[in-house]
Image (cartoon, helix red, strand yellow):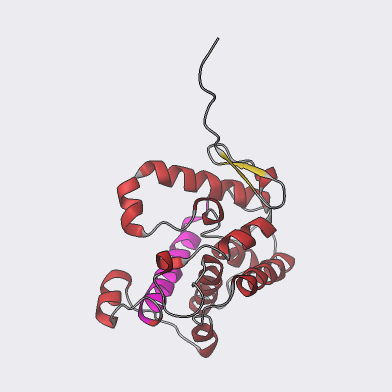
Amino acid sequence: MSGKAAPRAWQRMLSGRRLDLLDPSPLDVEIEDIAHGLARVARWNGQTHGPHVFSVAQHSLLVEALAGAITPDLPAEARVVVLLHDAPEYVIGDIISPFKAVLGDGYKGIENRLLAAIHLRFGLPAATPHPLAALAKTADKAAAYLEATHLAGFADAEAARFFGRPTVMSPAIAALLEPWTAGEAQQRFLDRFRALDAARDGADALAP
């Protein structure tokens, strides 16, 4: 019986894991692979100022900091969820919003399956509770505005039209807008994940 073999649908990670993009297993997810990958994926397709790209790892730290500023009593477990909100991009890259709209539901389905596997790997609910998802979205849009105006060449009015203006800001948040090397972004992401993971509360901790 002849025929072509099915196309490869898995990604080999530096850890040695092979993550199936179509049917991802939590057992093939490692935080070190996530940190390594996200630190080398550029936001804004690399169209940002500075000697280094502004990575998805650094963006994730910015979003988590903004979520904490919006909701100061946000539990550690909820912060882990926010930190991992773009974690699938360690496998599929950061696709800008206009292109996501072109790709449609197929892309979103892959992204959601990957995120569910990542959540399960770290003992989180496969689906993010709606209030926390809404908070993460608010913080994500605030981060997009800050990145757009500080790094990506957007005028204030243009960025505000697309993303709205943030309601919170601090020197600590502003410091997260200076692009880091890939190595620094990787280590800071890992350090933050490990600190939050160590501080996680009980099963009801996801309510923001």
Q: Position of residue 101 (x, y in %)?
A: 31, 51
In the picture as drawn, the residue positioned furthest to the top comes out as 1
Identify which residue, 169 or 200, lies in the foreground.
169
Residue 33: name its quadrant: bottom right
Quarter containing the N terminus: top right
Q: Position of residue 157 (x, y in %)?
A: 25, 80
Give the magenta-colored segment's residue range. Answer: 127-149
Taking the image as drawn, is residue 163 in sight?
yes
Quarter containing the C terminus: bottom right
Q: Position of residue 203 (x, y in %)?
A: 67, 57
Relative horizontal placement of residue 47, taking residue 57 as reference (left or right): left
Work out whether 9 lies above or below 57. Answer: above
Identify which residue, 164 or 188, lies in the foreground.
188
Q: Main secondary structure of the magenta part?
A: helix
Residue 21: name its quadrant: top right
In the picture as drawn, the residue positioned furthest to the bottom comes out as 171
Q: How many marks?
A: 0
Residue occupying the point 63% across, 53% down: 124
Residue occupying the point 53% across, 53% down: 88
Residue occupying the point 51% across, 59% down: 86
Residue occupying the point 49% across, 88% down: 170
Relative horizontal placement of residue 76, taking residue 207 as reference (left or right): right
Relative horizontal placement of residue 45, taking residue 56 as reference (left or right): left
In the picture as drawn, the residue positioned furthest to the right comes out as 198
Work out whether 25 lies above or below 92. Answer: above
Q: Position of residue 166 (x, y in %)?
A: 39, 79
Taking the image as drawn, is residue 207 in sight?
no
Is 112 magenta? The answer is no
Is 136 magenta? The answer is yes
